[in-house]
Amino acid sequence: MEYVVEMLNIRKEFPGIVANDNITLNLKKGEIHALLGENGAGKSTLMGILFGMNQPDSGTIRMYGKDVRISNPNVANELGIGMVHQHFKLVHNFTITENIILGVEPKSGLAVDIKSAANRIAKLSEKYGLNVDPYAKIEDVSVGMQQRVEILKMLYRNAEVLIFDEPTAVLTPQEIQDLIKIMKNLVSEGKSIILITHKLKEIKAAASRCTVIRRGKLIGTVDVAATTEAKMAEMMVGREVSFKVDKKEKEPGEVILKVENLSVQNSRKVLGLKNFSLEVRAGEILGVAGVEGNGQSELVEAITGLRHAESGKIFLRDEEITTKPVRARINAGIAHIPEDRQKRGLVLDYTVEDNMVIEIYDRPPFSKNGLLNREAIRKYSEEIMKNFDVRAGKGAESMARSLSGGNQQKAIVGREVELNPEVLIAVQPTRGLDVGSIEYIHKRLVEQRDSGKAVLLVSLELDEILNLSDRIAIINNGELIGIVNAADTDENEVGLMMAGVRKGESA
Amino acid sequence: MKLPIIKGIKKETAVSLLAVVFGLVAGALFMLMTGNNPFAGYAFLFQGGLMSIERIGNTLATSTPLILTGLSIAFAFKTGMFNVGAAGQMLFGGFCATAVGLTLNLPKPLLLTLMLIAAILGGALWAWVPGFLKARFNVHEVVSTIMMNWISYWVVYYTVPAYFKGEFLETESRKISDHASLKVAWLSDLFGGSYINLGILLAVIAVIVISFILDKTVMGYELKSVGFNRFAAEYAGVSVNRSIILSMMISGALAGLGGAALYVGNASNIQIGILPSQGMDGIAVSLLGANSPLGVLGAAIFFGLLYSGKGFMNAMTNIPPEIADTIIATIIYFAATSVMIEKFIDRIIRRKRGE
């Protein structure tokens, strides 16, 4: 069997850590090859080496049987390796064609020959079933379409090997299916694909083989059709994992958080949330499902006080909190696991212990007469770190920056749960985390529900919403599309609603 | 084991020390290029600053305004603001102190207290404006503090000749009386007649107070959180706007105090048409001191030493006095590019570990 790419015995060390230890990955022509591993397992490092962003300490890379040295991404491009990054690198007020030819503009005289480029793009689009309008502007097209532009960028540069880095994170379930179809078209036309992901379902749906790495070591390459999801998960984590969250039946209690006809502007000064109403009861998890950027941030920021409401009211129990400042809401019992743990959740240049009291440093015993009580802060933080299994090199004194993503997130979850809130708002609480940490955080969220708290869960991961929620509110374009009981719905229904189709209407 | 010095020292300190070493080496090269002996040059430079008790006093006095402006800028940096307006704040603070000193006739302790309060308030007021503009209208503080520098410059330019004109010159104020000066006999005598004054004590107290505020207090915790990550601070319910204004005012107050140290301490009148150079030098001091109060103290004294020694070096050799300024500039350059030095240190450490 001919291999397009062979990465043989790759080893890469960073100060203090072996990121890749003797890893071998062989890519056959015309296959979708999944690269599976937890966060920090070394997937990105390995692909970075293939794409020329890192140099291996030892090991060889071969393409079509010949040794190659990929010293930078330009060399990778010349060899026909393209990467579709997780975060798109597109100029928003350029057309699709302009974005694709950026850097390799075809010239006629001094001018850029847009027309012939657009023609070529249209042809490529047709060949691979991408359905892209070369003259549309990026800012006018959907996220799924933007991703296809990224794919076209690679095809336009004659890439034979395409690396997809967590491509489904930003897509709706329907868009994910479209993407898988596109990937299959690509391989049937002779391209080869490496798919980096930690979502087993997608590997099952798309890939033919799967290479699993764990903590920098190669665990093995398996035939996807012959391997169960549970087996792959076990290979990835190193122990058995349960996917199902244990959740007892529970009758929800009184209404804790009520949102009434809330309208909120987004950062572009147009209404990002329109006339939105919602109730969260004690002892229930209400999931908010929606594609990224459909008003979830505006909803959460209005409830937490980070953004002011144009109209409408927010109640915590019977008290109106619509215009209260952030700190007053925290003190009244709203805890918030923010969407972006590094932007909002942590002061990265503070120690873990300073971060653990960031909402309550002004309360006794953490301070008195304006002076901080270091001892009390230390004790409190160590308690949280112990209870929530936060691991850090120097304990509570470690810089927050030095923690891994999973530990940062566990620290935030611990901090918010420890506030003993009435309402816990969890936004993307497991974004980018590995299976082990996800399992752990899910368990803690359900614990909150079981102890009678109201939990508002906002997530882009439909599985997470379906698994954890008691009820699901679907949001699209800032509007509430509907609320369904988790027990009576499925991925398809919610997926359609996420795309804006109301219940009862047909697609 | 090749670099035992680096062991046990914080990386920031090592970076600053290396910046100094590189700066001195560069200075030596310049001296060689101008045909002079660098060893002799440096010997005279340091003798000029340290040779006698009086010269040590003068060095400390030269350092005093630098300590305060450096502290002002470092405090602003720590709390997320870039205060380029220390010059204007210190000029206005110094002017306020001078005005009080020339107007009131009171016993010395009372008068000095009032003058210092005036300097602190004047500096704080001058920094409040950019703080308010940033908090309310998101005007970048670099722009507004620079403009405030010039407003300060012209206010003094107009007011001094109009109300406090000197006996002989239009371009400077009357001299303040001994009553209104930070110079005190016992301190001058202690340093053999140097012009060192109470300013140095104020500066040292300010270093201690600011250290304390930053490390131990709720206010410092809040201000720093805004400085490090204003989004996280906002998320946690810290009033970011209040913090911005407060941090600018404290920064301005320190610069204002620096103005008092300069105009009613080291000097005894105020001149028009000059923005004090210590305002901008404070940025360098703060950089070299890695924004820590103690670091600022050390860096300011070192710069003070170079400034006060350069005259002697000039008198004793043919080395142009600009060499001292060049050394300072080179050190600033290395301190500013500390990222490079940090990488250099990292590489040495790694090599030492045999990686």
Image: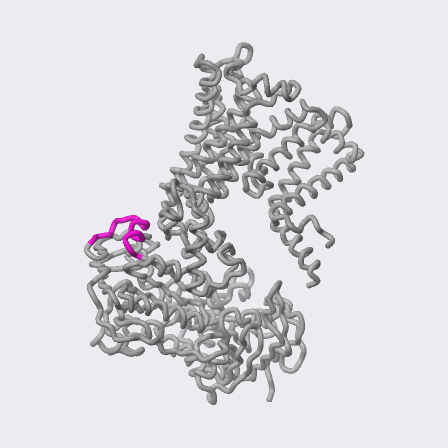
Answer left or right for B89 relative to A480: right
Q: Which residues are magenta?
A: A319-334
Answer left or right for B16 relative to B103: right
* Residue appearing at x 26%, y 53% in the figure: A309
| Magenta span includes A323 | yes
* Residue appearing at x 51%, y 77% in the figure: A35
* Residue appearing at x 45%, y 68% in the figure: A433
Query: Which x, y percent locates residue A2?
Result: 60, 87
The front one of B167 and A453 is A453
Query: Which x, y percent locates residue A12?
Result: 62, 70
- Name the quadrant containing residue A409: bottom left
Residue A313 in sight in this render: yes
Is A420 above or below relative to B10?
below
Is A118 above or below relative to A412?
below
| Magenta span includes B34 | no
Quarter of the image with the C terminus of chain A is bottom left
Residue A128 in sight in this render: no
Query: Which x, y percent locates residue B129?
Result: 40, 34
